Image: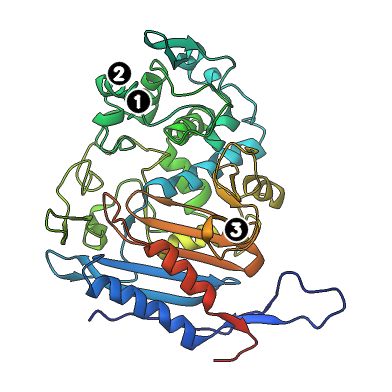
Amino acid sequence: MTGSTRWALPLLAVVAAGTPVGAQEPSLTFSPRRLARIDSAMQAYVDQGQIAGAVTLVLRNGRVAHRGVYGWADKTTGARMTAEAIFRIASQTKAITSVAAMILVEEGRLGLGDPIARWLPSYAAATVATRSDTGWALVPVRRPITVRDLLTHTAGISYGTSPQLAERYRSQGLGPAAGFGWYTADKDEPICETMDRLGTLPFQAQPGEGYVYGYGTDILGCLVERVSGHPLDRFVADRITGPLGMSDTHFFLPPEKAARLTAVHRRDSAGAIVKAPDGARGQGHYLEGPRKSFAGGAGLLSTAKDYARFLEMLRRGGELDGVRILSPTTVELMTSNQVGTLFGTDGLAFGLGFQVALRPGAGGSPESLGTFGWGGAYQTDYAVDPGAGLVIVLMTQHLPNVPLDVRSRFTNLVYQALVPGRTP
């Protein structure tokens, strides 16, 4: 058995949603006995050989309600997981890059309606692969791609792995030639060179006509570089992670932190959890590599604690410990539906960088109306529930994702532990 740690601190009560005016307002708090179910469930995943290890963290009104540490950071060497373990967070990078872009919007240096071709000229002649009578034809985009399109994933730009795009993207070092499509950490060129080249390739859909998940936030990171005049790693460090005290969040890991990097695991042919191979579809190039591609879509590494600080800043309307990153109005804009019905999942929508719940229980989750979040390809996940005062972080490290219900089970266990008053 691998030990876990959990601290239940005094928590501020929140008013339950839907309390009638004039009625006595019930409060909710965490039951320590019910929180302990998280430990049992997560440890069972490890003991049954379904995951190698995990770190879980739950904040309630800014205070630690639960922290769990389970299993192995590297099952091959027997290195145990620790609370300070560093994880590749892949698409959780998108939230930080989206905040970086909105900082520039707040400063008047970038506009949501700005065409991206202003900074990336190759996108002025963008095309879309459209099915025709003889196969696939390339047609011009009907309107310019905008900054808003990138933030909402409605630019029509995928990861280039679909049949009509795959070979074209592969020839330019993208799509199937980039790990599982999104990986650029091994590239010996700045991210803007890669994104300039992407602009010469056909896209999957017309701008504004559908939700298409792909390289949009990598392009956005390039815009941050060109508008600010600084590499994305420096901008993020100077304006977000540094001010918030996120000292373990990096695009490429400093050598002195190498021992804290969690290994990537996968299933072998017999179904056992083993260490993944080196390279773009395994351990990656975050320690040894060119260290040139600061990918705003999937490039960061972080800890559960660091990422929870970033999320707590958003939960508090853009400020944490006296440091303001964004205005409350901007955070509200980012975490509200900006795509109408294009997201296509009942009860869920997309804002400027985040999935947003339009009703309680959307997507089969117990999260409240207004909860926002996302996850990463290495099987990391997060959610912020402003109504309940919750920040929820789950970090594991598997690629491809282990097809388990770890995320949904963990979320359900967090919410079942909220009970009226202080009944254990």
Where residue 104 appears, as percent x and y from the top left, is 60, 37
- Amino acid type shown at disc 2: Arg
- Quarter of the picture containing the N terminus is bottom left
Measured from the top left, where is residue 166 in percent x and y? 30, 24
**Between discs 3 and 1, the one toward the N terminus:** 1
- Residue drawn where x is 51% and y is 50% of the image: 240
Q: Residue 181: name its quadrant.
A: top left
Q: Is residue 346 visible?
A: yes
User: How many numbered badges does the structure rendering display?
Assistant: 3
Q: Which amino acid is tagged 3?
A: Thr
- Viewer-closest of 132 and 7: 132
State the residue at coordinates (48%, 70%). 412
Q: Quote the CA–CA distance across marks 1 and 2.
A: 14 Å
Q: Residues within 10 Å of mark 1 (few under 14, many from 20)?
A: many
Q: Secondary structure at mark 1?
A: helix
Quarter of the C terminus within the rendering? bottom right
Mark nearest the camera among 1 and 2 is 2
Q: CA distance from mark 3 to mark 1?
A: 34 Å
Residue that badge 1 annotates: 194
Q: Which residue is mark 2?
A: 168
Relative vertical location of residue 64 with respect to residue 105 in this rendering, above or below: below
Between residue 52 and residue 124, name the one nearer to us: 52
Compared to residue 277, the image places residue 404 above or below, namely below
Q: Which residue is mark 3?
A: 371
Front position among marks 3 and 1: 3
Which one is nearer the viewer's eye here, 96 or 340?
A: 340
